[in-house]
Amino acid sequence: MRYFYLLLPFIVLINTLAANAQNWSTPVLISDMPGINNNQDMCIDRAGTRHVVWSHKVTGGYWTIMYTKSTTGGTTWSTPDTIVNIPGAWLYEPHIVSDTLNNLFVSFDSISQGGSFGQVYLKTKQGEQWGTHMRISNEYELAVHQLMTIDGNNRLYIFWNGYYNQNAKFIYKYLENGVWSTQIIPFVDSNYYSLRSVKTDKLNNILCNGLFKYFGQGGSYPRVFYTKYESVSNSWQTIEDMNIYNSDHGCDIAIDTALFPNLVWGQYTNTAYPFEHATIFKKQNLWGWGDSDTITKDEEYNQKMTIDKNNTVHIIDCYVLPDNNTLTTFNYYTIAADGWSKEILDENGSIIMFDIETTNVSVDIVYVKMIAWPGPDSARTYYINKSILVGLPQTVGKGQPLFVYPNPCNAQTTIEAYPPKPIPVSLFIVDVNGKMVKTFFVNKTLSHKIETIWDLTGDNARLIPSGTYLLVLKSEKFIYVKQIIKL
């Protein structure tokens, strides 16, 4: 009983934090500039500063790029600043990332008024000084819908959709040590590709998904694809076709703590009118892609996703009300014990543009809400967040199921595992490609703590090379994965 009272304050603290973690903050108004604001994007740098960019329509019919930041965790924001203004041009779809030094990079499309010609540009900020914007795509080539990502070595990638031999392709360049690469087209087959999301993992690989059509597919809607750039081999994996039904609602990709891709997209679930709809979630594991999971069968759009360090999936999208196509609900989904849970974040307006990110302690969302369409004061930009518990025990009673210390390691390391149930379990280590490295035991029934000292040798008794490995505790009922870094 004495130990119970000693632990009671800690238990109360955890329960209090868990309760608070379920509540979204009151929306903070970032901008109420008159006119139309959309295509917002957000990044959070290593100092915790939130940076947001968006497109703003000005008098005369052209669009500028706006920027604001918050150094107070999203509670207050700087006055929005026009960082790019090209008279007569439509500046669309800005994206923002930061490097390890907290320098900022903003990419955007520049469309000629009338929409007949497009180029991709980049603007950078070092310290408090914005540089001059520069064109990245080749001159006189159609380039639109750019995306951007940056790896752990500060190599900056800019992707866009363009044409090669009269076929739609995704194209990219990268900036490394101040030098731009030549233009690269990963897939030069006869298929049509439209890239929608790019993310970089901790091994500096690039994971991509988007929409594509097979050559000769005709006017039907496209399908979802996935591919990956392997930084070590400097090569692209073969395009994977992720679904058999038509998809044109939106798609996104996120990377979990075991470095596996997770996909979300909207699609039709039949091939004839009247179409039926669904939002689909699919994730990869050690044995390949799992089954597709239907989150909702409502007609929802613009799916966005992030994954926190607890491996919790966070998804947002919008639902257009069937009796009023100018109004939407703004929805949030996450996985609960009994399946997907849904929360409506906002429903008093039209919300179709948004972005979501995570930090060690919060989920952060920025969105544009149309108040009146059209009108002189028709759109406002808001920010909300929700606290999360990262790093606290997630398995009731026994804490986290896997511990490794020291980690990173260079001589030996101690592994502790806590099987949550007394059923046959296997404990082993694989590399990031899923190749078996070390087997500790297979289908062994244990109901107690497992502790072993690993000398960093594989099943062949040879010392493993430096790199990232995955410790796996697996049964028929569960699988836990923990990353191990060998220096």
Image: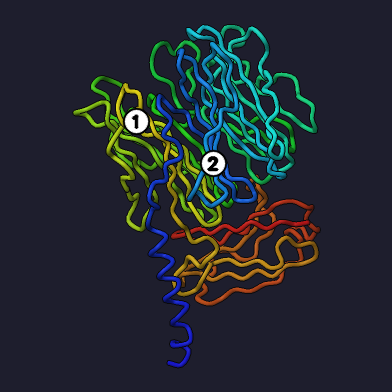
Mark 1, residue position? 370
First in sequence, mark 2 or 1: give its number.
2
What's the amino acid at mark 2?
Ser
Q: Residues within 10 Å of mark 1 (few under 14, many from 20)?
A: many
Query: 381 or 443: nearer the eye?
Result: 381
Kindly give the residue lying farthest to the bottom in the view shown.
2
Colour convention of the picture:
rainbow
| Residue drawn 44% across the image and 88% down it | 5
Q: Position of residue 155 (x, y in %)?
A: 72, 35
Determine whether 370 is above or below 260 in the image.
above
Q: Is residue 292 visible?
A: no
Q: Residues within 10 Å of mark 2 (few under 14, many from 20)?
A: few
Q: Secondary structure at mark 1?
A: strand
Q: Quadrant of the N terminus?
A: bottom left
Residue 351 falls left or right of residue 385 = left
Determine whether 238 is above or below 58 in the image.
below
Q: Are marks 2 and 1 in contact (CB under 8 Å)?
A: no
Determine whether 384 is above or below 372 in the image.
below
Residue 77: which numbered mark, if any? none
Q: Position of residue 385 (x, y in %)?
A: 44, 50
Q: Position of residue 245 (x, y in %)?
A: 38, 26
Residue 100 falls left or right of residue 3 = right
Residue 388 falls left or right of residue 432 = left
Gap between marks 2 and 1 measured at Cα: 22 Å
Kindly give the residue lying farthest to the left in the view shown.
323
Q: Is residue 387 visible?
A: yes
Q: Secondary structure at mark 2?
A: loop
Residue 78: which numbered mark, if any? 2
